[in-house]
Image (cartoon, helix red, strand yellow):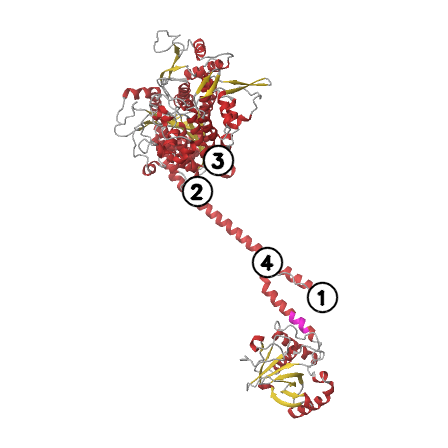
Amino acid sequence: FEKGRIYSYIGEVVVSVNPYRAMNIYGRDIVEQYKGRELYERPPHLFAIADAAYKAMKRRNKDTCIVISGESGAGKTEASKYIMQYIAAITNPNQRAEVERVKNMLLKSNCVLEAFGNAKTNRNDNSSRFGKYMDINFDFKGDPIGGHINNYLLEKSRVIFQQPGERSFHSYYQLLRGAPDSLLRSLHIQKDPTAYNYIKVGGQIKSSINDGADFKAVADAMKVIGFTGDEVQTVYKILATILHLGNLTFGVDGDVTLIENTKLVSVIRELLSTKEENVEKALLYRTVATGRDVIEKQHTAQEASYGRDALAKAMYERLFCWIVGRINDIIEVKNYDARVHGKNTVIGVLDIYGFEIFQNNSFEQFCINYCNEKLQQLFIQLVLKQEQEEYQREGIPWKHIDYFNNQIIVDLVEQQHKGIFSVLDEACMNVGKVTDEVFLQGLNGKLAKHVHYTSRKLSPTDKSLEFDRDFRIRHYAGDVVYSVVGFIDKNKDTLFQDFKRLLYNSSNPVLKGMWPEGKLSITEVTKRPLTAATLFKNSMISLVENLACKEPYYVRCIKPNDVKSPLLFEQERCRHQVEYLGLLENVRVRRAGFAYRQTYPRFLQRYKMISEFTWPNHDLPSDKDAVKRLLQGCGFDHDVAYGKTKVFIRTPRTLFSLEEQRAEMVQRIVLFLQKVWRGTIARMRYRRMRAALVILQAYRRYKVRSYIREVNRRFKNVRSMKDYGRHVKWPMPPKVLRKFEEALRSIYNRWWAWTLIKGLSPEEALQVRAKVASLEALKGQRADLGLQRAWEGNYLKRDSPDTAASFTLVSSELQRKDKFMRVLFSCNVRKINRFHKAEDRAVLITDRHLYKMDPLKQYKPMKSIPLYNVTGVSVSPGKDQLVVFHTKDSRDLVVCLQGMVPANESRIGELVGTLLSHFKRAVCVEEISTESLTDQQYGFTSCSHLYQPAGIQV
């Protein structure tokens, strides 16, 4: 203790001495020293027992629990916090966000529960005034995924009364000293705790507790856990309401009971979100149903004060239980399927009030000490009694070690019909006025001969006991004198139904949800509720059963002195605690016993890879023989004993050595399995890929054959079809044949075109070629190309029948003179000269020349341009049929076709197509390029108003 070594081991039990000072032995560097280590590898520490519990849970897939016990002020709450911090620090190495969120909420829940469930007592500045058992759920990887908290017997009498030198719950002082002024004003409260009757005793005490900083920490923790803003505000309103209730006083005016400070009623009404008259009525009257009749019975001042105090206690207890339930709703494991996520394992941490002996011990201390008796019984059962019985059962040579079995004290309290709880419940159920003295008489009558019970009536000479008030129980931790004053009322835990209806009818949904029983009608008959003693006894039995089904690890906390001094070590005080905690017997059992035991099949399952005789399976007569051969081969035969069904290992060092050898072999086995499995996976993948390739190739061949068959079927009779198969829809080709399909379509299209034109006459063939050339050149440029009609070419005879003879004579003369073979095109035009003057002319295009003629002078040739001098033709996209013949000497001929019969017949397409076809047939070096001239380029608005363009591109 003087050197700061505050931890020690007794087997797997950690003994912890409260140092009453901050110690630098819980940092991250210390966590790393204990992470993954065996129990005895490092100096004794809380982290070692936490790691042992975690490894047992993870290795053996078994639920474990850590039971922390000791007197009040011995350091149990701090120990539980350090254990939680260690588990949080070593889990979730991959930093999964959801696991981090759960860990953070589990740690923050401690902060909130301490604020509302802990208080400063004469023995401890942060004494747990409730019992807490937390289950932490882990997934198959060992990461926390949720949890659940059970709370036991909140000391709600502390709400209205504290012994000298003690405080009420931390939450009140945190609110008054840490809340902002705006919040205090909205709650109608002030910062001075001495202004409130319920907490003024504690408000006068100077304490090292920083309530202001704690208020902020608790508010932040509630936000992290997931409390909403409305829920937090409701919590503050309930605390403020309880403070105001404590200041309510009652007076009497004749036979009428009155509230003396009525202003507080309106404040309470506002905080509870209910009606003022309902608050006043619930405080002053009690509604009683007799059959169908409902009677309102007025309270006396004493009854009204009792009802007020009962309401304050019930509101705080209900608030605390609601906070625990709300935390459970948030942190519990949701949507977990063991078949999908693996087995869900648990580590339980029990932090419950320690054994208490006060100046005045009442019902709460009796329940707390009964709880410690149950836990001591569990310790005796598992560590001392069962272990010795197991040695005898397994045939291990063993000398019995005596120990005090406190089962007799547990029976004294909880035995049916004879125990103290049964006598108390029986007294509460009696008809008529039942007093605490009647209860004490019942105890004296039934327990007079019990060696662990006495009272003044049974021991008249014992002046430390008061007549009709005190009784003494000889606990495992020492003698405790209890005062029966208040036992009956606290056990009945009576709260008038009027208060429950008042709170249920609140317009605040959070407050209303805390009091669901308030919806019952006043005339509705309900079962008698279980007493506080019965509820607590049942919860303790359930807790012990829960702990017994897990693998337990113990932390036994020792209090070095009663004055909280970091320098004083009282040997007598510590010796007494060591004795009543059963640590001496524990040391004797551990020295004589074995540190580890396991059934033969389970032992082999874990360590069989160490020996060549047991890996992978042994051929020896039994598992026991196989275990013997394994341990003999390792040289540990001197440190073990062989029972009928289990092997026992005496020292932890042997177990650590086995674990080291196993870890080394597991690594080699894993590498071997990985090699084999990777090879298997590669071969499976190769076979799948090869099979897939064969299937793919077969499928491709099938698709190709199917496509060719389908094409053959659809185009089988194409020669006999009217349109030679033009209407036939092509089947969808597979991807591999898409280029083939394009080539096939091209072949078909060429065949189809050849089939169409092979029967045409030479003249028809020329016309088709001209139309194709026109379509290629002008498609999309002009709306009407005249493709639907027959192209005659020489239109002057048809358009001007009156002058046809003159034209025929002139054309014959030109043919004789210029030796042209045929007329390509002729038409009436309107010519625009360089001075923008329009004149009627005619154009004759042969295979040798382009002639401009005057129709008014019997088609006298005015200009002859050899075709080889024509370098290009430009046409407009409009309906004006404008044509520009470009020449090498840049003396372009600009004309507009006119005089068509029928009128407005489009001949631009025929002109362009005929010229293109002619030049292609003549294999002319120069190509005729056609360019669509826009109105903007030429700057004209109609065919009759033409302007010289700025430039013409060839």
Mark 3 vs mark 4, CA separation in Å: 52 Å
Front one among 211 and 343: 211
Front one among 131 and 933: 933
Q: Are marks 1 and 4 in contact (CB under 8 Å)?
A: no
Q: Tag 3: residue type? A: Val
Mark 1 vs mark 2, CA separation in Å: 71 Å
Residue that label 2 marks: 97
Label 4 CA crowd tier, 10 Å (few <14, some 14–19, many 20+): some
Q: Circle 2 — which element?
A: helix
Picture residue at 60% right of the left edge, 66% below the top: 742
Which is nearer the N-term, disc 1 or disc 3? 3
Residue that label 1 marks: 717
Q: Is 333 colored magenta in this rendering?
A: no
Question: Does 848 sit above or below residue 367?
Answer: below
Q: Magenta residues, as a range?
A: 749-754
Q: Are marks 3 and 2 in contact (CB under 8 Å)?
A: no
State the mark number for residue 700.
4
